[in-house]
Image: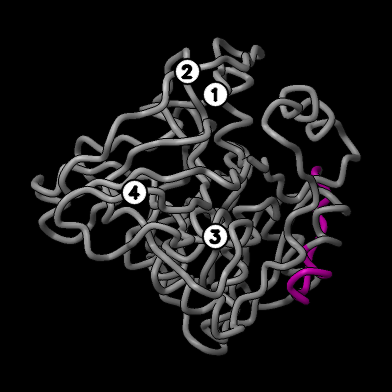
Amino acid sequence: MQTLVLDEPGRLSLVDTAEPGTPGDGQALIRIRRIGICGTDIHAFRGEQPYFSYPRILGHELGAEVVKVGGGVTNVTPGDRCAVEPYMTCGDCPPCRAGKTNCCQTLKCLGVQTDGGMRELIVVPADKLHPSDKLDFETLALVETLGIGKHAVDRAAPAKGDRVAVIGLGPIGLTVATFAQVTGAEVVGIDVSDKRAESARDLLGIQTLVLDSDKPIHEQWSDVQGELPLVVFDATGNRTSMQQAFRLPVSGGRLVFVGIVLGEVAFDDPEFHRKELTLMSSRNSTGRDFREIIDLIEAGRVDVSKWVTHRSDLAAWPQAFESWLAPGSGLIKGVVVI
């Protein structure tokens, strides 16, 4: 079967590999139909992804079809269309027992810490499959990235009418803004790029603030928006932005780091204490998030029909990927079709 391998930073190879065997008890053999491309894949390609080693089969945003199931599997049957929860967890460590499977102490994400879905067939635990008889494969492939935003919003728990700022309007920032909207919060997106701000306005209808890089974020917010926001999400993965973000929440507010940066992030402790801020991180998502997202899309409360701007088949993707990353490509979300 065709398999795409990231051999080392900057080098992808299309190779032929053996098909997986028969699924065992509790497992399912799935045929990958769509693969979403995200920042993790880009960072891995550039050699900038933490918790990563080479060579690696990428692919963790997956829309798949069930081919065969092993013994004891009741949640899916052959032919089902599914979103794949790519987080392989132990189920027994303290976080898993507490229901925080996204923080499993031995978590391995497909396509990151273990080989992923950039191949035709793969065997996975059946309980990681979330079926839908209404959504197509492309939409199902977006559920994982949507889960990052939903989990972050659930962590911060904004309420209807709360002022929320989302810094960084790439795909992850868009998912955060999407689920903040679901809560009824008043959402403003922030970015240095006019193009990304325009995309956020077009896709979500939110207000946006385009930054002048020479002026602190909180000052630019105050100049335009007035009162500071109660909840701030930073989805940039940029150290300067993350450090400035401490100044943006109103006193008593909450700051959530969704993006991750290699190394340390510093902040002014007296100011942090003066405001009595709550600082949170957000990691991955859970099976519950997957199921709730599918329900929200099926009910028409979340619309991602215009998010995919670039498509490629598996064989052509290494060449297409370079053009996707080019400035001005207009990339919002790319999908590989198998």
Q: What is the tally of numbered marks visible in this picture?
A: 4
Visible residue check, residue 324: yes
Q: Amino acid at mark 1?
A: Thr
Q: Quadrant of residue 100?
A: bottom left
The residue that label 2 is drawn on is 17
- Mark 3 or 4, nearer chain start: 4
Residue 211 lies, in percent from the top left, at 80, 53
- Mark 1 or 4, nearer chain start: 1
Q: CA distance from mark 3 to mark 4?
A: 19 Å
The residue that label 3 is drawn on is 140
Q: Residue at x 19, y 61 (%)?
A: 99
Q: CA distance from mark 1 to mark 3?
A: 21 Å
Q: Residue at x 41, y 53 (%)?
A: 66
Residue 90 lies, in percent from the top left, at 16, 42
Q: Amino acid at mark 4?
A: Lys
The residue that label 1 is drawn on is 3
Q: Secondary structure at mark 3?
A: helix
Residue 68 image label: 4
Q: Label 2 near label 1: C-beta < 8 Å? A: yes
Q: Is residue 172 magenta?
A: no
The residue mark sitting in front, 2 or 4, is: 4
The residue mark sitting in front, 1 or 3, is: 1
- Mark 3 or 2, nearer chain start: 2
The residue mark sitting in front, 3 or 2, is: 2
Q: Quadrant of residue 80?
A: bottom left
Q: Is residue 204 magenta?
A: yes
Q: Secondary structure at mark 2?
A: loop
